[in-house]
Image (tube, grey):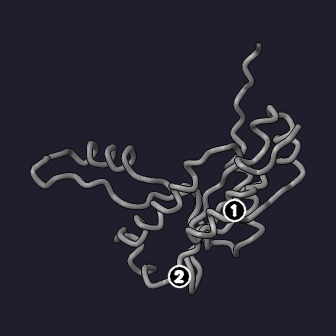
């Protein structure tokens, strides 16, 4: 069986939705949140410290900074349960990251952006304050239709025969 070529579509999907949903200048993608703790007794060069901070920091797919709210957005195209956990962790890290101190007082919305039905999982997500936003441009539907059946359906979405 021939192995399928993996296509990176999440970045295009995410930026297209952000550009249509929010005003210019309010959103940024691949944003570091939180800081790795480097014990004070460990002496590092500036290059080593920069490498550690890049390698061991969490990255949220997008942060939207609005006057009264902050939106943390994770994009889920394939069946990746980790995105749910990540949103919860990113909210916790955001509230502790000094770079975002000016926004700590704002309401935080956690958004899971996906083209796929989340089925029973959607109720679970609501319990944790995660909003599911469905965005289904034609090109992403075509992409999903090129995947195996198991990969194009949402987790716990339905049973197909």
Quarter location, residue 135? bottom right
Image position of 115 (left or right of 125)? right
Q: How many marks?
A: 2
N-term-proximal mark, 2 vs 1: 2
Looking at the rendered image, the quarter that the N terminus falls into is top right
Tag 1 secondary structure: helix
Tell me the residue that label 1 is attached to.
Answer: 122
Nearer to the camera, 74 or 85 = 85
Q: Position of residue 61 (x, y in %)?
A: 58, 56
Q: Which mark is residue 38?
A: none
Image: 120 above or below 126 = above
Tell me the residue that label 2 is attached to.
Answer: 107
Q: Position of residue 142 (x, y in %)?
A: 88, 42
Query: Which residue appears farthest toward the top when viewing the image?
Result: 1
Quarter location, residue 113? bottom right
Nearer to the camera, 73 or 98 = 73
Residue at image position (74%, 48%) is 154
Image position of 22 (left or right of 98)? right
Residue at image position (84%, 56%) is 136
Q: Position of residue 151 (x, y in %)?
A: 75, 37
Image position of 30 (left or right of 21)? left
Image: 56 above or below 20 = above
Residue at image position (36%, 47%) is 56
Quarter location, residue 118? bottom right
Tag 2 secondary structure: strand
Q: Position of residue 40 (x, y in %)?
A: 13, 55
Image position of 148 (left or right of 122)? right
Residue at image position (70%, 56%) is 14
Q: Residues within 10 Å of mark 2 (few under 14, many from 20)?
A: few
Q: Residues within 10 Å of mark 1 (few under 14, many from 20)?
A: some
Cα gap from disc 2 to disc 1, whole angstroms: 21 Å
């Amino acid at each position: 069986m021939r192995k399928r070529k993996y296509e990176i579509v999440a970045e295009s999907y995410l930026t297209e939705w952000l550009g249509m949903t929010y005003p210019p200048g309010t959103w940024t993608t691949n944003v570091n949140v939180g800081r790795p703790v480097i014990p004070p007794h460990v002496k590092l060069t500036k290059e080593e410290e920069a490498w550690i901070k890049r390698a061991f920091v969490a990255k949220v797919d997008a942060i939207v900074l609005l006057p009264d709210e902050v939106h943390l957005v994770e994009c889920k195209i394939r069946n990746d349960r980790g995105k749910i956990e990540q949103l919860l962790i990113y909210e916790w890290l955001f509230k502790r990251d000094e770079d975002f101190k000016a926004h700590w007082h704002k309401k935080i919305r956690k958004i899971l952006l996906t083209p796929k039905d989340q089925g029973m999982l959607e109720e679970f997500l609501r319990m944790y304050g995660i909003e599911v936003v469905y965005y289904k441009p034609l090109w992403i539907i075509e992409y999903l239709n090129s995947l195996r059946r198991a990969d194009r359906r949402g987790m716990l979405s339905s049973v197909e025969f």
